[in-house]
Structures are given as structure tokens and as C-alpha cells.
Amino acid sequence: MDASFGSMADDSAGSVVFPRINVRDPYKRLGISREASDDEIQGARNFLISQYAGHKPSVDAIESAHDKIIMQKFHERRRPKLNIKKKMRDISQSRVVQFVTNRFQTPATNHIIKTAVVFALLGVLTVLFPTEEGPTLQVAISLLATIYFIYERLKSKLRAVLYGAGAFGISWLLATFLMVSVFLQYFVA
């Protein structure tokens, strides 16, 4: 009577041993590429099983590699990897982003440095001269800096003064009404 399929004594007698039995990478073990389709994976498995059917460790190694690949593919389908570069390229090529990026320009380095110096000066003045009546000096410097930066952009003194004063007036009124509404909301109610 023949020995059982699991017996090692009869397996090694006349059967061929799978040459890539100890290869760790399941794709290399089956001899397929990482981009192989499900049909190619199944075909490689079936071909190798039919070739090395008489040697149980070879069949186990082939089945193990097949199972690992199938599980990897399953997990990739469940949790696909995000291609950040492709997503960013798609977003940057959208019409809205193109409109916004074409509308605005990155300011020159000297403009950024001038703005940083003005803000640093305002910060230092606020720390050195805190007033109980309000930051009058800082507001005046902010208004002058606003008019200067608008003039630098538009090259028109009249428009720079009008835009700067208009922005100052609107922000002053808005801040005043917001303060009153906050006061009324919390202290009157």
C-alpha cells in the first residue's frame, strides 16, 4: 500500500524538488512580476503545482507564496494607497486653483522683508509703549505703512491714500460694532 501524501519518505524518492522553495519573496518564488493580474497569479500557481505535485514541501511553498500574494492584493484593494503627487497635480491643474494662482503673484523678496520689518517695529512699539487709551502710535504707523504698500503696488498717491483711509475707516467701524455686539451679548443678556 502507498504511503500517505504527507509522508516525507516516499516524497523525495522520485519527485522533482521546487528550485525556489526557500525564496522569501512570494512573487519571485512563483516567478511573476509585481504587476501580475489575478489570472497570471493563478496560472503560475497551477502550472507550478502540476509540475511539482509529487513533492509536498514544494507544493506547500507554492501554495504559501500564492496565499501571500492573494492576501496582499486583497489588502491593497481594501486600503488603496493614496498617490499624493498625483492628487496634488490634479488639484493644481483644476480651473479654480489655476484662476487663483494666475490672479495672485508671490511678492518680491524685498517687499516681504519690508513688511516683516514694519510688523516687527509695530510689535516692539506695542511692547515698549503700552497705553491705556489705545495704541494710537501703532495705529498711525499701520495706516502709513498701509498707504506706502498700496502706493508701491499701484504707483498712484491719490488711490493709495483713498484705499488706505477707506480700509482704515471700514476696519475701525467694523471693530467698533463688533465690540458693542460682544458687550451686549454677554453683559446685557
Image (cartoon, rainbow, N blue to C red):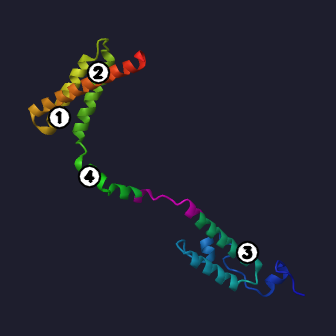
Answer with mark 3 or mark 2, whichever residue precedes in sequence: 3
Residue beneath disc 1: 150
Q: Quadrant of the N terminus?
A: bottom right
SS under mark 3: helix
The residue at which mark 2 appears reads as 176
Q: CA distance from mark 3 to mark 4?
A: 59 Å
User: Is label 2 in contact with label 1 (beta carbons under 8 Å)?
Assistant: no
Of the image marks 2 and 1, the number of the one nearer the N terminus: 1
Residue type marked 3: Asp
The amino acid at mark 2 is Thr
The region drawn magenta spans: 75-86
Crowd tier of the residue under label 1, counting other residues whose Cα lies within 10 Å: few below 14, some 14–19, many 20 or above: some
> Which residue extends farthest right?
1
Query: Is 188 situated left or right of 97 in this image?
Result: right
Q: Vertical placement of 156 versus 57: above or below?
A: above
Q: Are marks 3 and 4 in contact (CB under 8 Å)?
A: no
User: Disc number at residue 99?
Assistant: 4
The mark closer to the camera, 1 or 4, is: 4
